Image (cartoon, rainbow, N blue to C red):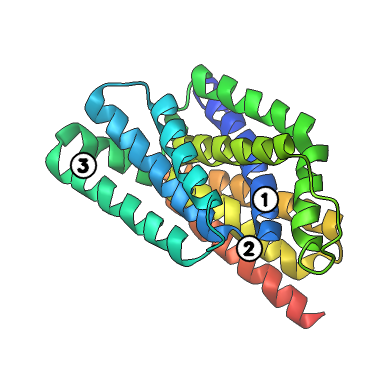
C-alpha cells in the first residue's frame, strides 16, 4: 500500500512517464533524439539559473527550453549542432554550480531527481500536461506520420504550421516538466530508451507507441518497487531499469 505522503509523487511520476514515452516515440519517428538531449540539458540550466535569481523554476526552465528548441528548429543539422548545444548547457550548469552555492544544490536536485518530494503543484502541472496530451494525440500523430513519410513520399501534404508549432511547444513542456519531476537523467531515460526498445518489438506505427508506453510504465513501476524498499534514490534506479528493459527488448527481437 502507498502511504499518503507517497501517493502524490507516485501518480505524478506515473503520469509524466506516460507523457515522456509518447514524446519519445514521436522524437524517434522525427529523428530528433539529439534535440531532446539539448533541450533537457538547457531545461536543467534554466532550473539552476532560477535558483540563483530566486525566480520560479518552471517558467525559467520552459523559457530556456523553448529558446533552445527554436534555435534547433532553424537548422537542418540534427546531430552536430544539438550536440554542441547540449555540451554548452552542461558547461553552463557546471559553471553556475561552481560559483553559487544555491546553484550547486539545484544542479544536484535536477541530476538526482526530486520525485519523492513532488507535491500537489507538480501533480496538477503533470495532470494538465497529460490531459493536453490526450487531446493533442491525433494532431501529434499527423506531424509524426508526415516526418516518416516525407523523405520517401515528398508529395505528402504537410501538417498546418500551427500544428507543427503546437507539437514543438508540447515537446518542450513534456521534456522540461519530466526533467523537473524525475530528474534529467531519468527523464531522458524514460523519453528515449522505451522508444528504442519498442522499435525492435513493434510491427507497425501503432505497435511502436503501445510498446513504448508499456516499456516506460513497466520501468517506472519496477524502479518504484525497488528503490523504496532498498532506500535508494529513484532516478538512477529508473535509468538502470530502463536500460535493462531496452536491452531485453532488443534480445527478444533478435530471437524471433
Tell me residue 72's x, y (percent): 50, 51
Q: Nearer the viewer, mark 3 or mark 1?
A: 3
- Label 3: which secondary element: helix
Of residues 127 and 224, the one drawn nearer to the viewer in this rendering: 127
Relative vertical location of residue 236 with respect to residue 162 in this rendering, above or below: below
Query: Residue at label 3?
Result: 96
The residue lying at 47 percent from left, 27 percent from top is 118
Task: Farthest residue to the front: give it.
Answer: 155
Task: Farthest residue to the bottom: give it.
Answer: 255
Image quadrant of residue 14? Answer: top right
How many numbered dots are placed on residues in this image? 3
Tell me residue 94's x, y (percent): 23, 49
The residue lying at 79 percent from left, 39 percent from top is 139
Per the model, the C-alpha gap separating discs 2 and 3 is 35 Å
Relative vertical location of residue 125 with respect to residue 243 in this rendering, above or below: above
Image quarter hosting the C terminus: bottom right
Of residues 221 and 13, the one drawn nearer to the viewer in this rendering: 13
Query: Residue at label 2?
Result: 245
Q: Earlier in the sequence, mark 3 or mark 1?
A: 3
The residue lying at 86 percent from left, 60 percent from top is 155
Query: Residue at label 1?
Result: 218
Per the model, the C-alpha gap separating discs 3 and 1 is 36 Å
Of residues 64 and 228, the one drawn nearer to the viewer in this rendering: 64
Mark 1 surroundings within 10 Å by alpha-carbon count, few (fewer than 14), some (14 through 19), many (20 or more): some
Q: Are marks 2 and 1 in contact (CB under 8 Å)?
A: yes
- Label 2: which secondary element: helix
Amino acid at each position: 500500500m502507498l502511504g499518503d505522503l507517497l501517493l502524490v509523487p507516485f501518480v505524478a511520476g506515473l503520469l509524466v512517464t506516460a507523457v515522456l514515452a509518447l514524446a519519445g516515440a514521436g522524437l524517434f519517428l522525427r529523428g530528433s533524439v539529439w534535440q531532446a538531449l539539448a533541450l533537457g540539458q538547457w531545461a536543467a540550466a534554466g532550473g539552476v539559473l532560477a535558483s540563483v535569481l530566486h525566480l520560479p523554476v518552471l517558467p525559467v526552465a520552459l523559457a530556456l527550453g523553448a529558446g533552445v528548441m527554436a534555435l534547433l528548429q532553424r537548422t537542418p543539422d540534427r546531430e552536430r549542432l544539438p550536440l554542441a548545444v547540449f555540451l554548452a548547457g552542461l558547461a553552463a550548469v557546471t559553471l553556475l554550480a561552481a560559483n553559487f552555492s544555491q546553484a550547486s544544490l539545484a544542479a544536484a536536485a535536477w541530476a538526482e531527481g526530486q520525485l519523492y518530494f513532488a507535491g500537489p503543484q507538480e501533480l496538477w502541472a503533470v495532470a494538465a500536461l497529460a490531459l493536453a496530451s490526450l487531446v493533442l494525440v491525433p494532431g501529434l500523430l499527423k506531424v509524426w506520420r508526415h516526418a516518416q513519410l516525407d523523405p520517401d513520399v515528398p508529395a505528402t501534404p504537410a501538417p498546418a504550421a500551427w500544428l507543427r508549432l503546437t507539437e514543438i511547444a508540447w515537446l518542450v513542456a513534456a521534456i522540461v516538466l519530466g526533467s523537473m519531476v524525475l530528474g534529467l537523467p531519468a527523464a531522458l531515460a524514460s523519453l528515449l530508451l522505451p522508444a528504442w526498445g519498442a522499435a525492435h518489438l513493434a510491427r507497425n506505427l501503432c505497435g511502436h507507441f503501445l510498446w513504448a508506453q508499456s516499456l516506460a510504465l513497466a520501468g517506472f513501476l519496477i524502479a518504484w518497487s525497488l528503490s523504496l524498499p532498498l532506500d535508494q534514490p529513484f532516478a538512477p534506479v529508473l535509468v538502470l531499469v530502463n536500460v535493462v528493459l531496452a536491452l531485453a527488448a532488443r534480445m527478444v527481437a533478435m530471437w524471433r
